[in-house]
Amino acid sequence: MMQLKDFETLADAQAYSTTQPKLIHRDTMNSLLASAGLYVQFKTMAEDSANPFQNLIAAFLDSVEYNFMIGNATGDRQILALDTMIEAGGDLGAALATLKPVIIGIANPAFNPFVNATSHDFAKAKGIMVYKPIPDSQIDSNGYLAIDVDVSLNADFVSHAPQIHIETHGIKQRVAGFQTISKSGKYIAFVNRNRGLFVDDFYGVISNG
């Protein structure tokens, strides 16, 4: 699956849609077949030795879970079998043609993994985060860091949880973090150290001492 860092823009990431395939439980499938008027017909077909789909339907009804996941070997085989029955035509084929998109949709639900990603999340993922050095004076003798936040400084501000870092050989490592900041005010975090700290401040709303 794509990661947030793989997108060129935040808008592209938020619009990205993929599927999260899953099996369909017997109870759900039986309900779908009954709603389509097919459950009793399937039971009859499974007992009819003259029906060309007897073995297929009998095996199908014996299942506990149903695989119609696109791109999965078993799922693709099941979809092909469904298409074969649809192509046979008649009332059965017509009913299955109506039911197929419902089954495929349940087995392959679409979701947008990054729809709620913020510009802060995107900057962090892309390695373009803005880090602001923290003056030693902002850390008290007990190891608590206080920052002042003014969200009015950036109209694009979005609630987020700024993280605190140290820098070693040019590489920043997280050592602590603030709870979510959503409005102007003072925020406090325990850092247990008194120098060389940075806070991520992508929106430019944190006071620098």
Image (cartoon, rainbow, N blue to C red):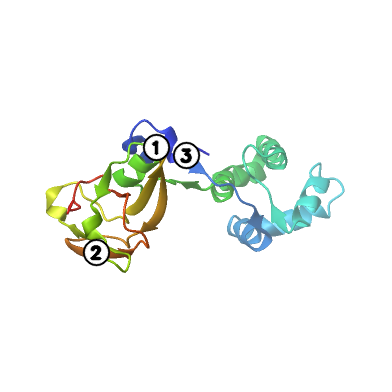
In the picture, measured across the screen, residue 94 lies left or right of residue 167, that is: right
**Residue at x-position 18% and y-position 51%:** 208
Nearest to N terminus: mark 3 or mark 2: 3
Residue type of the residue flagged with mark 2: Tyr
Marks 1, 3: nearer the viewer: 1
Which residue is label 2 attached to?
187
Q: Position of residue 199 (x, y in %)?
A: 30, 50
In the displayed structure, does residue 109 sit left or right of residue 128? right
Residue depicted at x 72% and y 42%: 74
Depth check: 5 or 202 in front?
A: 202
- Say which residue label 3 marks: 3
State which mark lies toward you, 3 or 2.
2
Q: Amino acid at mark 1?
A: Gly
Q: Amino acid at mark 3?
A: Gln
Residue to which mark 1 is pinned? 170
Whole-angstrom CA distance, mark 2 to mark 1, is 27 Å
Between 147 and 7, the one lying in front of the other is 147
